[in-house]
Amino acid sequence: MALLLPVLIGMVGIAVDMGNMYMTHTRLQAAVDAGALAGSLELPYDPDLSKGVVRQAVEDMVADNMEGAVVTDISAGTEIRSVKVTARAEVKVLLMEVLGMADGYVEANAMAGFNKLEVVFVIDNSGSMKGTPIDLVKRASNELADLLIPDGTTPDTKVGLVPFRGKIRLGEAVDGYAKGCVNADGSLNQGIHEDFMDEYYALPYYYRSYITLDTCSNIPAVLPLSKDKRTIVAAIDSQTATGAASGTVISEGIKWARNILTPTPPFTQAGDKEDFRKIMIVLTDGDTEDGECGGSYRASYRPNNYWTNAYYGMGVDTAHCNDGGVLNADMLAEAQAAKDAGIEIFSIRFGSSDNTDINLMKQIASSKQGTDDHYFDAPSVYDIPDIFKQIGKQLGWRLL
């Protein structure tokens, strides 16, 4: 027993030391994970880690989570647009250091950033967006796309686009749908429905001269998910918000973004929701509009350009934009269908609007309960670029 006692004491001492090392490493790893995530949130403002913004966020978060931990390295991660953090912490050991079995510290590292993302921009292209508003939206969209897919890289991230007015336009035929503008029931939109043409010809020529039967060809085409940076930028830049109007039907933009973000037809470029974080960014400067809502966009004669939208275009003249009407109800229903498919929705309300419209945009957003963290209000066009950066911060919250 006398001979075994030192051995037993040594074994107990080593066990205690190993327990201390394990507990210290566990705490350190949690602190480093938090630091990497905090740093990744600042990548939109410091993408190449040259401004010190990412470093400050990392060091502050590690210090908050573990006193005495020392950050030894902060660098660009091996994944695109990511930050890698390494830190060490001292461990109080009794025997292992004396025996040369440990150095008295543990080390941990973590990486976080932008990858495994599928993002679709759903952008209002109605006439009220033309000029500075659409130009700033394009700039902000391109900056976010550049953050997600930097030049010369091929990250596992995809970007798509759904420009919408009173309907959307498919640039190519896809499974079950013809090339061109699409009605709410999936049929091909051909302007004013044949059932309404008698009313069209009954109008005085003066009114008919204000109606453009082709309100489709000037809508930019939908872009399915793509990793090709040039293709994405070209699609974003194609938006001008000019040409003949057909109203604003937000539900159609949301519906087709959901179609793009799910791997089943009509589009199949999307990955599984277990592998990709799926994001929809919806921006509009107005509520749903079909010419029946009053205000400056009300049409005083019927039919009119609004009768070429996705509902009138399939022969339905009872889907209106009044509060609680079909268009608003369908917007909420399409947003819920997207959420049920595992898609996060960020909504951006640009310009001034009433409480009903604001509440609708808040309802479609995927905000955490008790917050509006996925809803953004942009009273001025100049608020839009910063809002896209704020959304970019939230997209970086992922350990890699």
Image (spheres, grey):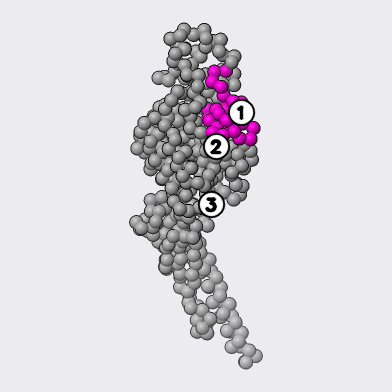
In the rendered image, which quarter is residue 181 located in? top right
Quadrant where the image shows the N terminus: bottom right
Q: Are marks 3 and 2 in contact (CB under 8 Å)?
A: no
Element class at badge 3: loop
User: Label 3 sits on what residue type?
Assistant: Asp
Q: Does the magenta-highlighted stretch encompass residue 315?
A: no
Amino acid carrying label 2: it is Ala
Residue 156, label in figure: 3
* Residue 279 position within the rendered picture, expressed as x and y whole percent measured from the top left: 52, 43
Secondary structure of residue under mark 2: helix
Is residue 133 something that shows in the picture?
yes
Please tell me which residue is depicted at 59% across the width and 25% down the height of the picture.
188
User: How packed is label 1: few (under 14 Cα within 10 Å), some, or many (20 or more)?
Assistant: few
Question: Label 1 belongs to which residue?
Answer: 186
Label 2: few (<14), some (14–19) or many (≥20) C-alpha neighbours in 10 Å: many
- Mark found first going from the N terminus, 1 or 3: 3
In the displayed structure, 15 sits above or below 116; it is: below
Q: Which tag, 1 or 2, sits closer to the chain's start?
A: 1
The residue that mark 2 highlights is: 257
Look at the numbered discs 1 and 2 and tell me whether their residues touch, using CB distance below 8 Å: no
| Distance CA(mark 1)–CA(mark 2) | 14 Å
